[in-house]
Structure formats: C-alpha cells, structure tokens
Amino acid sequence: MCGSNVFAQGIRTVEEFAPLDFVLCFVAQATCDYRSLCDMADSLLMALKFDESPKNPSAPAIWTGWFEFKTLIQSRLHLVEELNSKDFSSNRACWNIECPLLKVPKSELRKCARCHLALYCSPACQKSAWKTYGHRNLCRSATAASKSDHRDTRFSLLLTLHDYQAHKTTVLLQQLAYIKRTGNTEFCVVMQYTGGRCTPSVTGLASKAKIWESHPSAAWEADEGRKELHFVCFPTGGGGKTREIALALRRSTSAMLEGLVAVAQEIPEGVDVMRLAAMEPVLFERVRVLAGVDVVETYDGEASMKAYL
C-alpha cells in the first residue's frame, strides 16, 4: 500500500515517506530468515513489479531506497532457489575439519547413522570428528532438531557465505589495512547485519579471544590462510540487542592471505589502503585478482550446527 501510494501519487514530504521506509527495513530484516522469506515470497514477487521511478523528481532517496530493496530481495529469493535446487545438495564438504575435501559428491559421503546430518568421506574422518572435534556432543541435539531447523541453518550459512563473497574485495582491503598497520595476520571478519544488509569489517583476533578459545574449530591445526574466523552479528529484538555467532571458514588454498602479505610489503608509507584504487591502482588490481582466485570456501559444518541449533 505504501509503495503504491509513493509511485502512483508521488511524495510531498519526508513524513509521507517514513511508513514505506519502515516497511522496507522491517521486511528486509526478515529476509535473513528462511521461513519468513518463504512465507513472504508471493507478496515480495508482487512488490518487485513496481519498476517506475517516483513521480516527484525531488525525492531521489525514495527511488534509491526502493532500488536497493529490490536488489536485496531478488538476491535473497535467488538464494532460496539455490538452496532448494538439486545442485546445492549434490556436493558437500567432509565434516572432519582436518580433511581437505571441501567439495565431494554427496553419493561418496557417509552420513552419521544417528543424526543423519553429519557427512564424512571415510570411517577415519568420522572417527576423528567424533573424538577430536566433538561430534559426540552435537549429535544428540542435531538428532532432536527438525528438518526445518536444519534447512534454516543451511540457509543462514549460505546467506552469510554469499554476502561475504559479494563483499570480498572490500574485506580483503580491510585485511590488507590490518596487516599493513599491525604487521600480523591475527584478525577475524565481523559480518554485521542491519536492516537485512551485511556490513563487513575486520578486527583483531585478540578482541574475540575468549570466544575463539572455546570454539570447536580452535584445535584445528590448518595451514595459515586455510581457515578464517567469522563473527555474524544480527539484531534479536528491541533495545539494540544482537546475537553473535562464531563460524570457521574453511578454504581450499592459502593463496589469498599469502598474496595480501606480499602486497602489504609493497604499499608505500602514508597510503590509505581503503583508497588503494585511486592511490596505487596497480596494487589494487592485484587485490582484485586475489578476490577472484578460484577457491572452494565453506563454513565448518560441525561448529556451525552447534552455533545455530
């Protein structure tokens, strides 16, 4: 109703736009949740048919906000299609975090006989995950959880991974700035969700040390650059409260981190790394190339399920 009024009659005051702005923000936030998104799908598809710009030429913010909203909704609906497609479930990672196999045909993986959720490429990997990385502690709760709970979790992981990869060039620049400033690679990525949209940032791992020390993936002795700690933060209600979930990103190569360290050594003193595109275009192009490296990335299934269930 708000959208129809805006596009059909134009807008005269900021106060008239406020209800639409509120609705867009509320709906956008709900699209981080799989069940809410599916419930709203038909209505959202109808809303996307509003393609015309506002009649009032002095209200560009309204058109910009609507266009950003449409883009967000379209990307979320595509994620639902991807999650529900046969291709999505055809390849999975072995749940043993030490296993380098991150993209295995599902037919070649063995399910845990109890929870029917965890997947392993061999009895050795299943045994390692049970004893060393605590699947025995997760198995009971995973067994009790419903199929819809598991689907919600898979959507949340897919959404976070999608948003991380969409912002990868920005994240790599932030990591590069951290390396240049501190001289070390002890950082983590924070994915802050507001109004359904993700804003990434990079901070020192020391600030999250207590959470990481108790994380199931902390014992993983991976080559540096093949694992990365991510914190997903999103509102849980009024009062500015947020929920923070720690995820361990598994990566098939350490080339990106090695490349960032090499670029950091070549950045002249005084250069603002976040303005690298303008100040050092050759070095910025190397960061762009790193963002496009052919790499398999996935979140540690064991720890992720424990965080969400």
Image: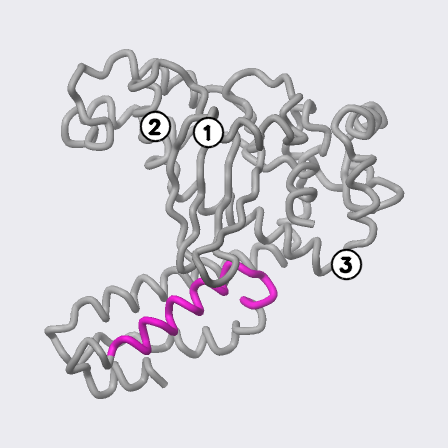
Q: Residue at x 44, y 34 (%)?
A: 189
| Amino acid beneath label 3 | Ser
Q: Which residues are magenta?
A: 17-37
Mark 2 and mark 3 lie on one chain; the one further toward the N terminus is 3
Circle 1: residue type: Ser
Q: Which residue is mark 3?
A: 146
Q: Secondary structure at mark 3?
A: loop
Q: On the picture, is 199 further left or further right than 272?
A: right
User: Left of 203 or right of it: where is 286?
Assistant: left
Mark 1–mark 3 distance (CA, rounded to whole Å): 35 Å
Q: Residue 227, position in %: x, y?
A: 55, 26
Residue situated furthest left in the rendering: 58
Q: Residues within 10 Å of mark 2 (few under 14, many from 20)?
A: some
Q: Residue at x 38, y 26 (%)?
A: 290
Query: Would you say 207 lies left or right of 80 here?
Result: left
| Residue bearing mark 2 | 289
Left or right: 132 as drawn, with respect to 171 = right
Q: What residue lies at 33% left-to-right and 37% top-to-bottom?
A: 170
Residue 26 located within the stretch drawn in magenta:
yes
